[in-house]
Every structure is written in C-alpha cells, then in structure tokens.
Image (cartoon, grey):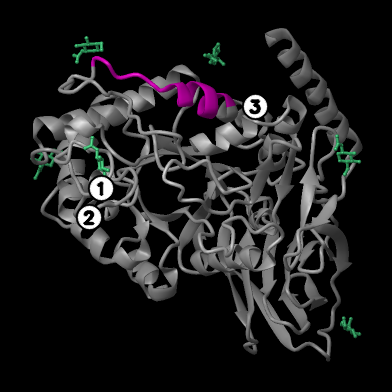
Amino acid sequence: MLLSKRLLWGIYFINLIYEKVFCQQVPCAARSYGQSSIICVCNATYCDTVEPESRLPQGYANMFISTLAGQRLEKSSISFTHQPSKTAQVTLEVKPQSVYQTMLGFGGAFTDATGINILSLSLPAQYHLIQSYFGSMGLEYTLGRIPMASCDFSTHLYSYDDSPGDLGLANFTLAMEDLKYKIPIIQKAQSISRHKISLFGSPWSAPAWMKTSQNMTGYGTLIGNPGGPYYKAWANYFVRFLEEYRKYNITLWGLTAQNEPTDGYIHNFPFQAMGWYPDQQKDFIALDLGPAMKAGGFSDVKLMILDDTRLNLPYWAEKVFSHQSNASMYVSGIAVHWYEDFIAPTLSLDVTHKEYPDKFILATEACITGNFPSKVSLGNWENAEKYAHSIIEDASHWVTGWSDWNLALDMEGGPNWVKNFVDSPIIVNAKADEFYKQPMFYAMGHFSKFVTPGSQRIEMSQDTSVEDFESIAFQRPDGSVAVVILNRGTSPVLTAIHDPLVGYLNRTVPPRSLITFTWWR
Ligand SMILES: *[C@@H]1O[C@H](CO)[C@@H](O)[C@H](O)[C@H]1NC(C)=O
Ligand SMILES: *[C@@H]1O[C@H](CO)[C@@H](O)[C@H](O)[C@H]1NC(C)=O
Ligand SMILES: *[C@@H]1O[C@H](CO)[C@@H](O)[C@H](O)[C@H]1NC(C)=O
Ligand SMILES: *[C@@H]1O[C@H](CO)[C@@H](O)[C@H](O)[C@H]1NC(C)=O
Ligand SMILES: *[C@@H]1O[C@H](CO)[C@@H](O)[C@H](O)[C@H]1NC(C)=O
Ligand SMILES: *[C@@H]1O[C@H](CO)[C@@H](O)[C@H](O)[C@H]1NC(C)=O
C-alpha cells in the first residue's frame, strides 16, 4: 500500500513537471446544478488549471477574468494606449507612491472535515485537489489555519489532554485527526508550494476538566484567574502544540489566543467554545501565554488577539493593549471574522489601525452560512461576489490577508458533529470520485495567485462612482502592479486604468464579473 502510494505521487510529480515545462493549461469542465453559474468538475484524470502569468514587456498587461456567464480565471493580454478612451465611464488612476499595508497572503483551514473529505477521494483526485489550492498551476495559497484539537468541523469532541487534573500536561498528545487528517495534507501542500505557507493555530476550547463548565461546549471559561494553575496549564498547552507540530517539520507562523472568545459567554452555545472577556485575554497573555511562549522558544510566533467579528473593534484591542499590562509586547496582530460585517462598519478597522499601527489585522475566517434550501449551493455566483467584495473591502481598510474556512466540504457541507453545515470553495463528491470548484474558488484565486506575499496595497483613485463596481490595487515585491476589479452590477462598465508610467488600459468590465490585471512598469 505504502509503495503504491509513493509510486502514484511519483507519477503525479512527473505530471506536474510536465505541466510546468509545457505550460499546458487545462480548461474548466463546466457543469450546471441549476444555480446562477457553473462549477468546474475535477476527477482522478482531469482537473482545470490556471495558466501562469506571463512576464510581459512594458506596455502590456495580463488579464484574468471570471464571469457569471462561465469564464474561470481565463487569461488574455491587453495593451496600454497613450490616450484615454473617450468612451470610458470610469477612470482609475494608480498611485504607487501612496503605500498602505503589506500583504501576508490568502488561504483556508486544514480542519478535520477538510482532511476527511480530501482522503475520501482516490489518490490522483487528492493530488488534483491539493494542487488546485497550493500548486503553481493552482491558486498558490500561502495562508493556512489549523484548529488546535476539535472544533465543530470534527466528528466528535476531543482535546489533546483528556486526563482530568493533568496540569503538568504529562498526557498531552496529538489526536488521530492530526496524524491522519491534518499533518499529511499540510506536508503535501508545503511540498508542492513554491511559497512559504504561513500556518497559524487556533483553539476552540480547553479540555473540559480545565473549565468552569467541565464541558467543551456551552457557556464556560478556564477555572480560576490569570496567573493561576489552570491558566498556566492552558498556556503550556499552546507551547506543547507548537512543539508537537515541529516534530513533523511543521513550523507555525502564528497563533490566535482563542477562536471567537465571545461564543463561550453564550448560554448553551452548541459546539466547542471558551469564553474570554478582553481584560481576561489581556491578563492571560501578559501573565501566562506570552511568558510561556517565550520560555518555550516560540517568541517569534505571531500571536493574534480577538479572532472574532470586527463588531468587537476597537474596544477589544483597546482593552488588551491598555497600558496596565505587558500583553501588547507579546501580540503581533488582530484577527477578524467576517460574520456580522453587515452591521459592523469598516470604520472599526480604520480606527483600530490608527490606534495600533504596529499591529497587523488579518481576516482569519469566513464562509457562506446562509444558502437555502441546502447549505451547499453548487455554482452560486453571488457567493463568489461576497468573497471578492469582502476581500476588497477588508484590504481597503488595512487588512493584510484573508483566510477562508474549510478548504473542502462534502455534498452536505460537512462533516460537522453539530450539523452546522456551511458551503466551501471546493465540494467533494466521494461517491463519484469527483470534486467541484465553486465560483468562490476562483474568487479566492483572483487575489491569492496575484497578490503575492509582500505585496503592498497602493492608492487607486476613481473619478466617478458606479454602483456595485469596486476595485483595488497592489504593488508586488518585484515592482509589478496587480489591480482587481469586481463588477456586481448588471451593466458593462467601460473602464480606463491609468498608470502614469505606462499609459491607459481601456477595457469593458462585463456585468457580474471579476478581473485581475497585472503588469510590469
Ligand atoms: C473525468 O473528467 C473528464 C473531463 O470531464 C471526463 O472526460 C472523464 O470521463 C472523467 N472520468 C471519470 C472516471 O469520470
Ligand atoms: C475603448 O474600448 C471601447 C469598448 O471596449 C472601444 O469602443 C473604444 O474604441 C476603445 N478606445 C480606445 C482609445 O482604445
Ligand atoms: C495519564 O493517563 C493515564 C492513562 O489514562 C493515567 O493512568 C494517568 O493517571 C494519567 N496521568 C496524569 C498525570 O493525569
Ligand atoms: C455539555 O453541554 C451540553 C450542552 O451544551 C450538554 O448537552 C452535555 O450533556 C454536556 N456534557 C457534559 C459532560 O456535561
Ligand atoms: C524534517 O526535515 C529534516 C530536514 O529537512 C529532515 O532531515 C527530517 O527527516 C524531517 N523530519 C520529518 C519527520 O519529516
Ligand atoms: C512587564 O515586564 C517587565 C519585564 O519585561 C517586568 O519587569 C514587569 O514587572 C512587567 N509588568 C507587569 C505589570 O507584569
């Protein structure tokens, strides 16, 4: 079994080199499930790829377009003109001298559900799936979230130490799920990626015995107070997690102090959660977690606070970073989730950045929860627009990267032990040995593949406002520019993009489309 596995991976590695050398782009095998748009079908022998960018001479731009009508990151080139088009409705002016935040990347989460779904496919189909996200002919994701122990996208409740009273963590051990569903997939992603993947861990709950509720679900918090034995044990649990993953050559870039700390203060909260008030998180970081990470040799791991909706900002940051403690010196960033964005203005991000310009803001979780009648909506274009809109909005307000939730779910939107099913950019149909790339998958790609780590957001002005028309610009580490335009409207928009160094790009942005332009200056 092991030998044949290796052989298969070997064959597909040769296949990868072949694709690389001959740059053979494989088109989308479109299928309709009666939604607004199509999905692209992949199986053991077939999977669409994205044609790599060309290093074009000055005066030309690459253009990648996806549309409701069915184009998926379709590549073409377009030349700059010296004159603006007289028919342009909108002129965008790129201003690379005005620089905002530096981008970390885009990605998704290695949940138990993700691993279970990937492993439910044949080996060649598994290869195609991992390649689709992390390969050079795929989306080239560079961010990955790892739930520490179980979350709702697990099949059951477990922690890394279920021995009651084991404050010394003598029985701390990774779960079968880490060894089977997370670590091997992360290792494969790393082995095929040409980028460093910034991985970060997030806990949902401490072991039940460490909590006031004696339960990983529902209302509950750690026993005692910051600085006390349970808080110390919980801090060491993070260090043990980092150490165990390192044994598998997986070095984490970051940690969030708690997934959605406000959930654990909701009565009867249905799945794993643990409650924190911002003052409590501040004291835990200052007295326990910060010092434990330092003592364990992990002070370079980027610690993030909040990991919850931006509705909590700037209040949460103001509490944690208050001068009464040392918490701030251990914290690198603030993690936000997109749920409730519709009632939380972007001003919360702007104010937080203004108050704490040396702390980055990272979007660490988003997914579509509201599809009806079923949680998985195959071919739904509106969901792609929601992803792209959120990324443009966030990155326009200091957010440095955007991590999706589950990388792959099944036809139901699971598995999830509390049946909290949701949608995902890749849906796995194990019975057919197929997986489906949703419009959301390509929406992620319009950013992840082109806005490479280290890119900086730059200013781009727009002369007239057009409803449902949004755009954003970045300068990449090699000086090239990437512009992404989202048209959620039902009319085409004649657009001119002006780069003072190069000229005008004149292009009609079709209705219901997403376009990425890249060029060298
Ligand atoms: C895989 O997909 C390709 C392209 O759609 C198709 O031609 C082929 O028959 C599929 N293979 C199987 C086993 O379904
Ligand atoms: C700009 O594009 C529009 C439609 O795409 C076309 O009619 C017009 O001639 C173009 N103008 C220039 C200057 O290229
Ligand atoms: C560790 O687990 C073993 C087996 O369940 C148990 O006997 C032992 O008491 C545990 N150790 C601690 C320190 O809790
Ligand atoms: C944990 O809490 C849930 C409700 O959130 C309850 O159904 C379950 O019985 C509790 N388990 C234990 C071991 O107390
Ligand atoms: C980790 O990487 C080192 C050096 O690249 C290698 O020697 C070692 O075998 C790897 N360990 C595991 C468990 O993969
Ligand atoms: C903050 O840390 C310094 C050492 O870095 C220590 O001397 C001081 O007591 C700490 N302050 C608090 C309030 O913990």
Name the amino acid type tagged 2: His
Residue 152 visible in image:
yes
Queried whether the magenta region covers residue 175, the answer comes back as yes
**Residue shown at 43% from the left, 63% from the top:** 339
**Residue shown at 8% from the left, 34% from the top:** 228
| Number of the label disc, if any, that sits on residue 218 | 1
Give, as a single range, the part of the protein colored magenta: 170-184
Q: Earlier in the sequence, mark 2 or mark 3?
A: 3
Queried whether the magenta region covers residue 64, the answer comes back as no
The answer to whether the residue bearing label 2 lies less than 8 angstroms from the nearest atom of ligand 4 is no
In the picture of the structure, the residue carrying the numbered disc 3 is: 191
The answer to whether the residue bearing label 1 lies less than 8 angstroms from the nearest atom of ligand 4 is yes
In the picture of the structure, the residue carrying the numbered disc 2 is: 267
Is the residue marked by circle 1 packed among few (<14), some (14-19), or many (20+) residues within 10 Å? many
Is the residue marked by circle 3 packed among few (<14), some (14-19), or many (20+) residues within 10 Å? few
Q: Quadrant of the N terminus?
A: top right
The one of 321 and 417 positioned closer to us in this rendering: 417
Please tell me whether residue 155 is drawn above or below residue 502 in the rendered image. above
Tag 2 and tag 1, C-beta contact below 8 Å:
yes
